[in-house]
Image (cartoon, grey):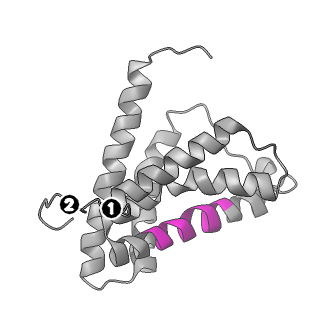
Amino acid sequence: ADLRLEPLGDMLALLAAAVWAGYSVLMRRIGAWGLDHVLCTRRIFSYGLLFMLPALGLLPFRLSPALLAGPGVLPNLLYLGLGASALCFVTWNRAVSMLGAMRTSAYIYLVPFITVLFSSLILKEPFTPRMAGGMALTLVGVLLSEGKFPGRRKEVASFGRE
């Protein structure tokens, strides 16, 4: 494997993490007001689409009805829009309101663990020692962040209230 540093990519990844952290904290505060998660997510998505529309004119992408009429395009768009985006954001916002932004963010690290597990069980992909090591490290990291190891006292930094 060739390891190269890409400062622009690294900065974009850090910026994405910072924006996601801000989003999670803001959704926790919005959830504390007792507002409906589905309506909040719908409004956030609407504003996101509204602010992305001007960028369409700057990109080489051209939308045509023939493109949308292709086989499987509309069902895939509906799945991505409703299932993989809207439903995931609604459940994320609900989890943040129930568990808090920091705890919910810690559990997101279980996604690679679950992915490897189900890819081996359902897709019958080979389970390698490297995968097992990654799963173990991921699980230990989540358990450490939650203070679940015996003899380890859980100390949480208090920065206001998430």
Q: Residue furthest right?
A: 71
Residue 138 in the image: state x and y as whole percent.
50, 48
Helix, strand or loop at disc 1? loop
Horizontal side of residue 128 vs 31, given as left or right: right
Q: Amino acid at mark 1?
A: Gly
User: Are the two marked residues, 2 and 1, in contact with CB atoms closer than 8 angstroms?
Assistant: yes
Helix, strand or loop at disc 2? loop
- Work out whether residue 62 can be spotted: no
Q: Which residues are magenta?
A: 80-92
Which circle marks residue 126 in the picture?
A: none
Q: Classify mark 1: residues with Cα within 10 Å, few (<14), some (14-19) or many (20+).
A: some
Which circle marks residue 147 in the picture?
A: 1
Residue 110 in the image: state x and y as whole percent.
53, 56
- Work out whether residue 66 can be spotted: yes
Residue 125 included in the magenta stretch of the image = no
Q: Amino acid at mark 2?
A: Glu
Which sits earlier in the primary sequence, circle 2 or circle 1? 1
Q: Which residue is mark 2?
A: 155
Q: Nearer the viewer, residue 45 or 128?
A: 128
